[in-house]
């Protein structure tokens, strides 16, 4: 549905674009190998891929460029599969939209900066806000699952609205 070659030609004319190519199945091992080779041959400092969804393949391409020696966060992706080829019935309209999405991805990529993942220790504890019946039950469930939990309640007593009731339905038990 998308004239991919036209999208490639549009991308070639964009400022900062060094290399463009139409790769079928760019997420495959062969496609990733081609991307790695182009990164090294052209000394690329960022990569834009116009293909499928980020949910499906962003991590794939980030790992690919990382293994080619490029910071994984110097990658941008335009989803022209789900947003263009799958949703449009008109080839011209789908192609124009794919061109625009690619232009936006290239523009965004120009402003990317290398990042490094942060690591911080995690304390496996829970803070339950609210000492009503739900809060108390949540704290009990968390404790039974092996997580120390602390309940914080703004009122001087716990139990919430339930503690204010005299009896509960259907057994007419004391709510407290």
Image (tube, rainbow, N blue to C red):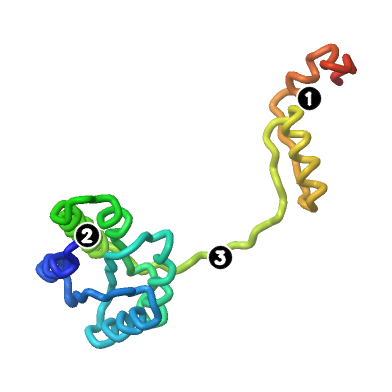
Cα separation between marks 3 and 1: 38 Å
Dot 2 crowding, Cα within 10 Å, few <14, some 14–19, many 20+: some
Comparing marks 3 and 1, which lies closer to the viewer? 1
Quadrant containing the N terminus is bottom left
Comparing marks 2 and 3, which lies closer to the viewer? 2
Q: Nearer the N terminus, badge 1 or badge 2?
A: 2
Q: Give the residue at the far front of this rendering.
A: 89
Q: Which residue is mark 3?
A: 119
Tell me the quarter of the picture where residue 95 sits.
bottom left
Q: Can you give x and y, in whole percent of width and height, for residue 8 in the image?
A: 16, 69
Residue 14: in sight, yes or no?
no
Q: Looking at the picture, does residue 82 appear above or below residue 37? A: above
Dot 3 crowding, Cα within 10 Å, few <14, some 14–19, many 20+: few
Name the residue at 80% across, 14% down.
165
Comparing marks 1 and 2, which lies closer to the viewer? 2
Residue 137: in sight, yes or no?
yes
Q: Dot 3: what SS?
A: loop
Quadrant containing the C terminus is top right
Cα separation between marks 2 and 3: 43 Å
Q: Dot 1: what SS?
A: loop
Name the residue at 30% across, 83% down.
34
Q: Which residue is mark 2?
A: 1
Q: Which residue is mark 1?
A: 159
Q: Nearer the N terminus, badge 3 or badge 1?
A: 3
Q: Toward the viewer: 82 or 34?
A: 82
Q: Can you give x and y, in whole percent of width and height, for residue 10 in the image?
A: 12, 65
Q: Are marks 3 and 1 in contact (CB under 8 Å)?
A: no
Name the residue at 82% across, 48% down.
144
Q: Can you give x and y, in whole percent of width and height, for residue 156 in the image?
A: 76, 23
């Amino acid at each position: 549905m998308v004239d991919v070659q036209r999208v490639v030609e549009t991308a070639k004319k964009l400022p900062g674009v060094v290399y463009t190519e139409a790769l079928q199945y760019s997420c495959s091992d062969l496609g990733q190998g081609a991307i790695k080779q182009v990164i090294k041959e052209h000394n690329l400092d960022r990569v834009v891929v116009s293909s499928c969804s980020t949910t499906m393949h962003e991590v794939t391409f980030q790992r690919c460029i990382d293994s080619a020696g490029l910071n994984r966060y110097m990658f941008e992706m335009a989803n022209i599969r789900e947003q263009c080829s799958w949703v449009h019935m008109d080839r011209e309209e789908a192609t124009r939209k794919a061109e625009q999405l690619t232009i936006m991805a290239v523009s965004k990529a120009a402003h990317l900066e290398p990042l490094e993942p942060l690591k911080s220790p995690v304390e496996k504890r829970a803070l339950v806000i609210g000492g009503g019946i739900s809060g108390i039950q949540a704290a009990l469930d968390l404790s039974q699952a092996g997580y120390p939990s602390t309940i914080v309640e703004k009122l001087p007593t716990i139990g919430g609205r339930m503690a204010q009731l005299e009896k509960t339905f259907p057994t007419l038990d004391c709510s407290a």
